[in-house]
Image (cartoon, grey):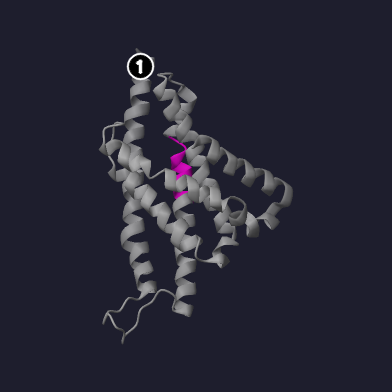
């Protein structure tokens, strides 16, 4: 997982350094398939706590992974116009930057090798990267909202055989207000509490 996300980060940074903003329209074609593969593998992070393979709960990983699935497989993969927008570049970079810190930290914990810089990055980088990631996700949803409202895509109107109506733009508005914002608050609150526990504990050790 670390190698995969590091590859995405390297491609994004190197191509941007060479091509500048001309790279934006080809970001999804360049690394989108790898991002989808890695996100599918991350489903295991929901089940690992459930079977006792790792400590911690499954709810927070579930929120993060299911949110990324919605953005990646439904909002981005199904809308080529958004794939070519700059927001895709910044979203993929924010997601990958989080993971290339998180996975090395997990590896260090497996080998019981505490690295103060890596620990600090693990519990501090989210302060910048999470808001960037959530903002990009919100932009992707909002842009989709505009497109599907104009096209009527994924909207089911009456009359139909099911006698059921579904207005996808309304669902996206509900998702933005009542799912994404609470999920963002939950994840950032969790990281804040974990940061207080982890870095606070490290500071006490230094004083002793």
x 38%, y 45%: residue: 43
Residue extending farthest bottom: 159
Q: In this view of the protein, which residue sits in the foreground, 145 or 26?
A: 26
How crowded pointer 1 is (Cα within 10 Å; few <14, some 14-19, many 20+) is rated as: few
**Is 18 positioned to the left or the right of 75 in the image?**
right
Residue stretch in magenta: 124-132
How far across and down, in percent of the image, does residue 31 sit? 58, 50
How far across and down, in percent of the image, does residue 10 sit? 62, 41
Secondary structure predominantly adopted by residues drawn in magenta: helix
Residue extending farthest front: 161
Q: Secondary structure at mark 1?
A: helix
Return the residue at label 1: 205
Please state, as top left, top right, bottom left or bottom right, where the C terminus lies in the image. Answer: top left
Q: Is residue 189 visible?
A: no
Q: In this view of the protein, which residue sits in the foreground, 86 or 54?
A: 54
The relative height of residue 156 versus residue 81 in the rendered view (above or below) is below
x 28%, y 34%: residue: 56
Does the magenta run of residues contain 141?
no
How far across and down, in percent of the image, does residue 124 sit? 44, 35
Residue extending farthest right: 18
**Is 90 positioned to the left or the right of 115 in the image?**
right
The relative height of residue 167 versus residue 47 in the rendered view (above or below) is below
x 32%, y 76%: residue: 166
**Which quadrant of the structure image shows residue 188?**
top left
Q: In this view of the protein, which residue sits in the foreground, 25 or 87?
A: 25
How far across and down, in percent of the image, does residue 94 sit? 51, 46
**Is 131 positioned to the left or the right of 53 in the image?**
right
């Amino acid at each position: 997982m670390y190698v995969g996300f590091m590859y995405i980060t390297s491609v994004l940074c190197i191509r941007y350094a060479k091509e500048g903003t001309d790279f934006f329209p080809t970001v999804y074609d360049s690394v989108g398939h790898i991002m989808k593969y890695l996100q599918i593998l991350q489903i295991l992070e929901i089940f690992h706590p459930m079977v006792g393979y790792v400590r911690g709960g499954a709810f927070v990983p579930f929120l993060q992974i299911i949110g990324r699935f919605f953005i990646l497989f439904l909002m981005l993969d199904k809308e080529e116009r958004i794939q070519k927008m700059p927001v895709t570049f910044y979203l993929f970079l924010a997601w990958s930057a989080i993971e290339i810190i998180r996975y090395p930290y997990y590896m260090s914990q497996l080998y019981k090798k505490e690295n103060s810089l890596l620990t600090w990055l693990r519990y501090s980088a989210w302060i910048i990267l999470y808001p960037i990631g959530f903002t990009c996700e919100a932009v992707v949803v909002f842009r989709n909202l505009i497109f599907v409202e104009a096209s009527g895509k994924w909207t089911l109107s009456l009359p139909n055989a099911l006698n059921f109506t579904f207005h996808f733009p309304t669902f996206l508005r509900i998702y933005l207000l009542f799912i994404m914002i609470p999920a963002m608050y939950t994840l950032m609150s969790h990281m804040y509490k974990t940061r207080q526990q982890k870095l606070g504990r490290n500071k006490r050790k230094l004083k002793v």
